[in-house]
Amino acid sequence: MLLSVVSLIVAGAWNWTETRDSSELPIQASSQQDTQVDEGSLRDTFDYFLSDASQTDVKIIEQRFEHYSDNSNGMEPALFKKFIQYKAALVELGATEDFNALHQQILALQARFFTFEEQQRLFAEENQMRELALRQKELKQIAQSSEEYLQMWQQELAQLSPELQKSYYNASLLTALNETNSMDAQSQFLVRESLVGIEASQRLAALDEKRAEFEQSVQSYMLARAEIIENKSLSEYDREQAIAELREPLFDSHQIRRIEALERIHDQKRASAL
């Protein structure tokens, strides 16, 4: 439900400098190399290409999308450019605690950039989820008791289409699962089990362990890499060789692409801090 607010933050971090044209430009950014283009919907595809907008020039992203659309049906580069302009315009709305006012401003922006049919294709579910959040707030204000609120809220949810009911359930479930991240391991497992069952809880616990191991490996690697970079006795070639030898036994081929992207982000932050 807070998707639009998140979009404001992402749009504000975009890079808009001019870039050179490149017919050999790969479709995916380096940070996306171990993923597949999300083709769940046109909006999903747009969001996929823009997921790297904080690290990649928007002009390059437009070129990547154009190259992708050459070999894919239903992709619309002109509509993608309008979507980029819309996302950038969101940041001009500024911060507000009035969610209803923000909702109306977003709808006005959508009408400014898109036809009604385009709005339905790109924003129908997002807009309905915000309207549902506003309705939920309204019901809490008018209900005389928690029991009355729950009854009215269930009636409201029952009026949604099966697709929106599923989207709302998934969003609520994801929020509930995210709230378990601050719990101790035992409490986290018990709450997860009540939400998704024991088998899924076990898989989540295994993923948590795997993620923690990866993050620890990355932290150790970055520290050792920094020591190599700061070693003035090594030539540039020797530094690159030493870093490659350090990296290869720690990460598999798919992880290396991700590590290289993390290295660039780390180096950019380090350079800007100097």
Image: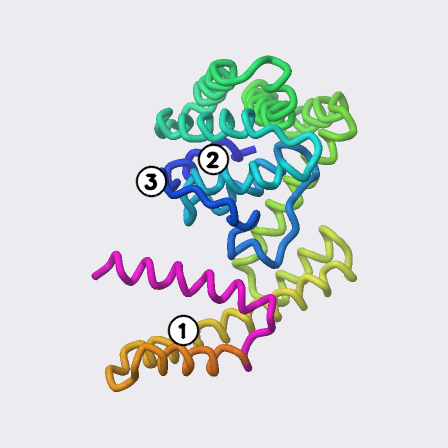
Place of residue 265 in the rendered image (x, y in percent of width and height, measured from the top left): 39, 59
Which part of the image, by quadrant, shows the C terminus? bottom left
Q: Is residue 160 above or below residue 179?
A: above
Q: Is residue 247 above or below residue 142?
A: below
Residue 65, magenta (yes or no): no
Say which amino acid is labelled 2.
Ser
Q: Label 1 neighbourhood size at 10 Å, few (<14), some (14-19), many (20+)?
A: some
Mark 1 or mark 2: whose residue is earlier in sequence: 2
- Which residue is most to the front? 23
Asked whether the beta carbons under mark 3 and mark 1 sit within 8 Å of each other, the answer is no
Q: Which residue is mark 3?
A: 17
Magenta residues span 249-274
Residue 262, magenta (yes or no): yes
- Which residue is most to the left? 274
Mark 2 or mark 3: whose residue is earlier in sequence: 2
Place of residue 86 in the rendered image (x, y in percent of width and height, measured from the top left): 46, 25
For discs 2 and 3, the disc positioned in front in the rendered view: 3
Asked whether the beta carbons under mark 2 and mark 3 sit within 8 Å of each other, the answer is no
